[in-house]
C-alpha cells in the first residue's frame, strides 16, 4: 500500500511537470522574454537618464559664472571692495545690491563728499554681461578713527558692519543664481599689504596692515 501511494505521488509530480512544460508554448516564452527585455530596458533607460542628468549638473557646476566680492584695505583707514566673476562663463543680468541698503546722504559725517553716491550710481542698473575674470574696484569704507561703545571703528558714511553685498544673476541657459557675501571689516583682521612708491632713490615698498580696523 505504501509503495502504491509513493508511486501515485511520483506520477502526480511527473504529470505536473508535463503540464507545465506544455503550458510554456513558443508564444508564451516569447511574451515572457519580451516582458523581461522591456523591464531591463526601463531600468537601463532610467539609469542612463540619471547619469545624463548628473553629468549635466556636474558640467553646469564647473562651467557656471560665479560673482564674488572681497573686502580689501586700500589705505591706513580705508577699505574697498573688489567684485569679479570668478566663474568660467559670462554672468548675465547681474544685479548688485546691499543689505541693508547703502545710505542715501551726499556728504559724510566729516563734512566731505560721500563716496556712496558713486557706488549707488555704479550699480543702479543690472549689468547685462559680466565676463569671466573681469574685476571692478570701489572704495567703500573710510574711518576717521571714531569708535563705537564696543571699541570698533565706525566709518564716516554710516555703513553698518553687518552689511552684505548681494548678487542676483543668470547664466547663458537662464539658470538663476544668488550670492551673498559679508563686508564686515572684521575680515581685515591681520591683513597686510605693500604699496610701491617711486622716489629719487628708486622704488620703495611701504608695508601697511589692517590693525586700525581691529577692535581695541
Image (cartoon, rainbow, N blue to C red):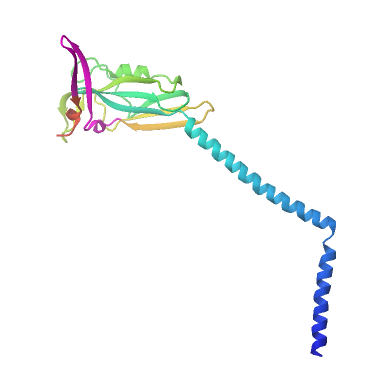
Q: Is residue 166 left or right of residue 79?
A: right
Vertical position of residue 55 compared to residue 112: above or below: below
What residue is rendered at 52% in x and 25% in y?
A: 172
The reply to whether residue 76 is visible in this rendering is no
Left or right, 95 with reference to 159: right
Give the quadrant of residue 83.
top left
* Residue 23 in picture, x, y percent from top left: 83, 64
Quarter of the image that includes the C terminus: top left
Q: Is residue 95 visible?
A: yes
> From which residue to which does the magenta span run?
183-207
Frontmost residue, 144 versus 107: 144
Is 61 above or below relative to 7?
above
Q: Residue furthest top?
A: 200
- Image spot of residue 24 (x, y percent): 82, 61
Residue 77 screen position, x and y as percent:
19, 23
**Image-quadrant location for residue 113:** top left
Q: Is residue 191 left or right of residue 68?
A: left
In the image, residue 108 lies at what x, y percent?
22, 19
Q: Residue at x 74, y 53 (%)?
A: 35
The relative height of residue 200 versus residue 131 in the rendered view (above or below) is: above
Amino acid at each position: 500500500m505504501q509503495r502504491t501511494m509513493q508511486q501515485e505521488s511520483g506520477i502526480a509530480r511527473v504529470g505536473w511537470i508535463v503540464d507545465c512544460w506544455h503550458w510554456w508554448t513558443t508564444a508564451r516564452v516569447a511574451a515572457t522574454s519580451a516582458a523581461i527585455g522591456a523591464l531591463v530596458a526601463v531600468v537601463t533607460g532610467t539609469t542612463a537618464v540619471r547619469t545624463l542628468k548628473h553629468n549635466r549638473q556636474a558640467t553646469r557646476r564647473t562651467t557656471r559664472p560665479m560673482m564674488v566680492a572681497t573686502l580689501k584695505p586700500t589705505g591706513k583707514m580705508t577699505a574697498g571692495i573688489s567684485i569679479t566673476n570668478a566663474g568660467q562663463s559670462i554672468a548675465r543680468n547681474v544685479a548688485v545690491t546691499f543689505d541693508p541698503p547703502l545710505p542715501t546722504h551726499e556728504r559724510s559725517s566729516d563734512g566731505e563728499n560721500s563716496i556712496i553716491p558713486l557706488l549707488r550710481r555704479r550699480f543702479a542698473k543690472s549689468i547685462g554681461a559680466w565676463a569671466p575674470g573681469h574685476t571692478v574696484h570701489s572704495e567703500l569704507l573710510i574711518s576717521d578713527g571714531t569708535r563705537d561703545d564696543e571699541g570698533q571703528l565706525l566709518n564716516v558714511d554710516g555703513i553698518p558692519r553687518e552689511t552684505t553685498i548681494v548678487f542676483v544673476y543668470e547664466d547663458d541657459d537662464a539658470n538663476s543664481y544668488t550670492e551673498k557675501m559679508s563686508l564686515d571689516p572684521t575680515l581685515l583682521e591681520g591683513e597686510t599689504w605693500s604699496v610701491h612708491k617711486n622716489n629719487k632713490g628708486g622704488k620703495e615698498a611701504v608695508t601697511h596692515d589692517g590693525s586700525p580696523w581691529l577692535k581695541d
